[in-house]
RNA sequence: GGUAGAAUGGCCGAGUGGUCAAAGGCAACAGACUGUAAAUCUGUCGGCGAGAGCCUACGUUGGUUCAAAUCCAACUUCUACCA
């Protein structure tokens, strides 16, 4: 019970609108997926996520395995029930932790040895373990266990990691999941075009219902990332969803959609939100800045989210400055609303055959630096 | 009234002759954050100057010394204890 339907394509760009059918409901793409690593999108309740339009959220294999343990989540009736979210869930495999916990892990052919970030204890995760954990979590979309390579790297290291990622993808594919779980393969190959193309071809031979694009947004500049997307996306199957993992900045989302990406996730809206950085149609805003102390306008006057309809910059700045937890909530809420609805707007524009204009307007208005009033 | 002790940068607080514009913390200001080891991290934080540097500063005033936040005297204020 997993299907991708292509609904509309932009005649001028690679942008496309579609639908993903999952056991927990339909997802309209392009879609931004809030990250809920530890079985919670930080500071947000599921009803609030519904209110702002979230269709699917992420959970993380590594974190939930470490705490509370996959068995507990399974005993609770699966991740959906455990956290009270009755819509689709995608779980990341732990592959990103191979990258982010690079000081705490050792990679071998069989798998990855992690030293727990919680207490230093040693754990070995093989692709099969990642599958078993995600099976217990019961997510709708399961990600293959991959190696996300840091940047910069050598062509040789990238190739070795890519080859290993493909071998691991095969092992993941061969592992019996729940009947209604869809497993996505993950394209690696760092910033080497040929490796990227080879990787997607070989993953296709193994065969997956969807494909993640990993190993981007790891410190490379935007042009480099777009260069990889430019060569990779045309090589990806049209009838399968494409998921650009860990991205990202609003401009990255639009440029990703332009090239044919269907799914995105990123910690940015919640992490930056907790740190007092909010998104507007004109760019990023550090709402903690002094210039907002007496600014009684909403974060983004053009935004119709709950936060912008009810609170001012001055109030949110006050909350942040006072260390009040509500600032983290309101900023996260607004940022999530911003990205989720940016993708909804993009989708509508694609369907209405006006995506190029939509893209141009957005890119012209959105300053990549910090926006000051 | 007596005795003892204390006064340091926006605040708290180290420092008891030179390497002190003065540790550290807080506050403040700015920046960063892309499949979350992040309600975190980094930088700035007396004034002027691009800079070398100059000026003003450790309660007040005066003194000792080549040199004082540091030593001495008086004064002011505060704290504790005793009357």
Image (spheres, coloured by chain):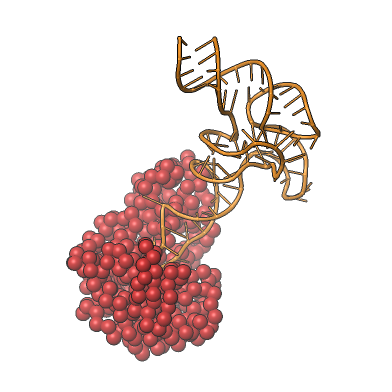
> In the picture provided, is A108 more to the left or to the right than B25?
left
* Chain in orange in the render: B
> In the picture provided, is A105 more to the left or to the right than A50?
right
Which of A283/B39 is in front?
B39
Q: Position of residue A95 (x, y in %)?
A: 39, 74
Q: Residue at x 34, y 69 (%)?
A: A62
Q: Position of residue A33 (x, y in %)?
A: 35, 66
Q: Position of residue A317 (x, y in %)?
A: 44, 45
Which of A156/A204 is in front?
A156
* Chain in red in the render: A
Q: Residue at x 24, y 61 (%)?
A: A83
Q: Is residue B36 above or below residue A6?
A: above
Which of A50/A185 is in front?
A185
> In the picture provided, is A176 more to the left or to the right than A215?
left
**Residue A120 is drawn in which quadrant?**
bottom left
Q: Please indicate, yes or no, whether residue A365 appears anywhere in the rendered image.
A: no
Q: Residue at x 44, y 51 (%)?
A: A276
The quarter in which the N terminus of chain A is drawn is bottom left
């Amino acid at each position: 019970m997993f299907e991708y339907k292509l609904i509309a394509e932009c005649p001028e760009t690679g942008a496309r609108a579609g639908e993903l059918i999952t056991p927990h409901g339909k997802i309209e793409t392009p879609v931004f997926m809030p990250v809920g690593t530890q079985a919670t999108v930080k500071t947000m309740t599921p009803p609030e996520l519904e209110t702002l339009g979230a269709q699917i959220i992420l959970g993380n294999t590594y974190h939930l395995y470490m705490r509370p343990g996959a068995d507990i989540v399974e005993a609770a009736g699966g991740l959906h029930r455990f956290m009270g979210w009755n819509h689709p869930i995608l779980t990341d495999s732990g592959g990103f932790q191979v990258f982010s916990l690079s000081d705490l892990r050792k990679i071998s052919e069989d798998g990855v040895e992690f030293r727990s970030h919680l207490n230093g204890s040693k754990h070995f995760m093989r692709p099969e373990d990642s599958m078993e954990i995600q099976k217990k979590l019961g997510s709708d979309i399961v990600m293959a266990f991959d190696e996300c390579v840091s940047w910069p790297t050598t062509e040789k290291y990238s190739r070795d990691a890519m080859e290993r990622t493909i071998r691991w993808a095969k092992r993941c594919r061969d592992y019996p999941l729940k009947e209604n779980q869809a497993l996505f393969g993950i394209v690696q190959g760092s910033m080497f075009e040929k490796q990227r193309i080879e990787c997607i071809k070989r993953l296709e031979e193994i065969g997956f219902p969807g494909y993640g694009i990993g190993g981007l947004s790891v410190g490379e500049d935007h042009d480099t990332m777009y260069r990889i997307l430019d060569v990779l996306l045309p090589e990806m199957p049209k009838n399968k969803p494409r998921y650009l993992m860990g991205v990202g900045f609003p401009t990255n989302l639009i440029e990703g959609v332009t090239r044919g990406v269907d799914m995105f996730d990123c910690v940015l809206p919640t992490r930056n939100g907790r740190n007092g950085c909010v998104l507007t149609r004109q760019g990023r805003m550090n709402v903690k800045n002094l210039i907002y102390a007496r600014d009684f306008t909403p974060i983004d006057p053009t935004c119709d989210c709950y936060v912008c309809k009810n609170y001012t910059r001055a109030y949110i700045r006050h909350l942040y400055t006072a260390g009040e937890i509500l600032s983290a909530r309101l900023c996260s809420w607004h940022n999530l609303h911003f990205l989720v609805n940016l993708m909804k707007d993009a989708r509508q524009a694609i369907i209405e055959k006006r995506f190029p204009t939509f893209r141009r307007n957005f890119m012209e208005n959105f300053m990549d630096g910090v926006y000051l009033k």
